[in-house]
Image (cartoon, helix red, strand yellow):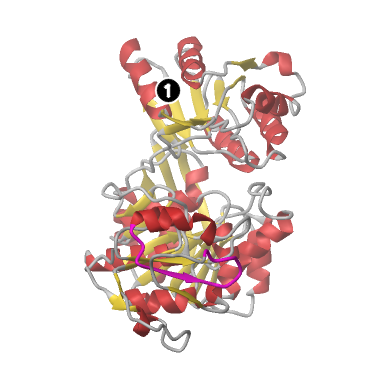
Amino acid sequence: MSPDGRTMGWIELLDGLASPAVDVQLGDLCLDSRQVRTGSAFVAVAGASGHGLDFLDQALAGGAVAVLHDGRAAVPRTIPVPVIEVAGLGTHLCTLARRFWGDVGAMDLVAVTGTNGKTSVAWLLAQALDGAMFGTLGIGRPGRHHRGTHTTPDVLSVYRELSALAAEGIDRVILEASSHALDQGRLAGLRFSSVIFTGLGHDHLDYHRDLDDYFAAKLRLFTEFESERQIVNLDDVHGRRIHDRLADNARVLGYTLTDRTDAPARIRPERVDLGGLAAILAIDGGEIAFASRLIGRINLHNLAIVALELKARGFSSHDIAARIRALEPVPGRMQMLGNGRGRLAVIDYAHTPDALENVLLSLRELGPERLWCVFGCGGERDRAKRPLMGRVAESFADRVILTDDNPRSEDGTAIVRAIQAGLRRPERSRVIRDRASAIRTALAESSSGDLVLVAGKGHETEQLIGERRLVFSDESVVRQFLEEAA
């Protein structure tokens, strides 16, 4: 149902698109049959591997009072609610969303894209800008958010959720823009104050044809949407491609953590240790010093983006430093846990080769005696990255334990073997399929001064095995062990 209880007749909704014979009052528009409630209109369009009408029975059972479809699939002859066809319906979804929920153009929207870092940047910027986040961790103000269904849901859901946030008095939202969302037009019609690129790595190649296709989807955020400024990571080769593509645009703000002199902004690390980070942002001939409780050099990129966004909005150096200092760490992202007895664990969502390498290198810089890595690879997802992740773990960790990470309907043993195919010396790694046992083993065998990285699931609270969704949290397993050990 619309967040403010609004309804709209579908004659008004479809004006200029179709001419319904009778009017029906609609309380919601749903592309996902699972979201349909009494009073909803079910909007059925062709998808990548099926059609919305395949789920018509579920929508009707949920309480749909009308059905709108694109004419690209057979419609049952007997449907107990009004049905109407709109040619090219998929291209009109943004129009329908704007008519029903209103134009959200008055909202201050920021979009973040990239393989790694989207979620961290969204969480941190939402805090720094007193706004809401919209993405992997959920929707709403950090710490008071509710769980979402996708990193970026369908276009009708995007407008519904933005309308709900506006109804709560929230006018600033930081959205994660996934490659799927950009490819499928889920952000159609939105205008942004900032669009941000964090970097590109090996992921989602089960959906995209290749890395170039993946990059092309990300590039759309910078070429197909209105934005006041673009913040780009110049330490990433694809970030440099975006920067060069937009080089004639004075609103492009590139940053680097290196010594390159062609970057408008440079971040100079001053302190990187278990106590957190300190750095200096050099920009416009001046310097801004800041410090944070966040750990790991990898977080300097995220904090650089926060600092640049605040600077672009006119915040003073003092306010920028104060807001960064107050930032709460991101759940399941370089999240450090310890019991004061020498054992330290870090939980991170790293589930791509690039992300795992960056996290391990960041942790190595903190000077552990030994660096442990407990990880697996998800089933029914990009298979090509499995041996690559094995190679990364073996190269940058001292001890490696392979385990399950949402095997879904795949054979977990086969997934482990695919990871082992990337190992030069597989006999030096260990396999403990039960994830809780793998984590507890690493912690039990670690010594004071060691660091144990538990990678892949981060904030997630479920383990997906076959058709089962089991309650499971890396953080809970680690905390329980540390409490028992203390």
Q: Position of residue 217 (x, y in %)?
A: 63, 63
Residue 211 belongs to magenta span: no
**Residue 197: quadrant of the picture:** bottom right
Q: Amino acid at mark 1?
A: Leu
418 sits to left or right of 66: right
The N terminus sits in image quarter: bottom left
Q: Residue furthest front?
A: 78
Residue under numbered circle 1? 344
Q: Secondary structure at mark 1?
A: strand
The C terminus sits in image quarter: top left
Residue at coordinates 44% horizontally, 25% vertically from top-left?
A: 345
Q: Nearer the viewer, residue 342 or 161?
A: 161
286 sits to left or right of 433: left
Vertical side of 308 occupied by 149: above or below: above
Residue at coordinates 54% horizontally, 68% vertically from top-left?
A: 185
87 sits to left or right of 211: left
Q: Position of residue 138 (x, y in %)?
A: 37, 50
Vertical side of 383 occupied by 43: above or below: below
Q: Which residues are magenta?
A: 63-76
Q: Magenta: predominant secondary structure element?
A: loop
Q: Is residue 465 visible?
A: yes
Neighbor class of circle 1 (other Cα within 10 Å; few <14, some 14-19, many 20+) is many
Vertical side of 55 occupied by 39: above or below: below
Residue 71 belongs to magenta span: yes
**Residue 288: quadrant of the picture:** bottom left
Q: Is residue 289 visible?
A: no
Q: Nearer the viewer, residue 238 or 134?
A: 134
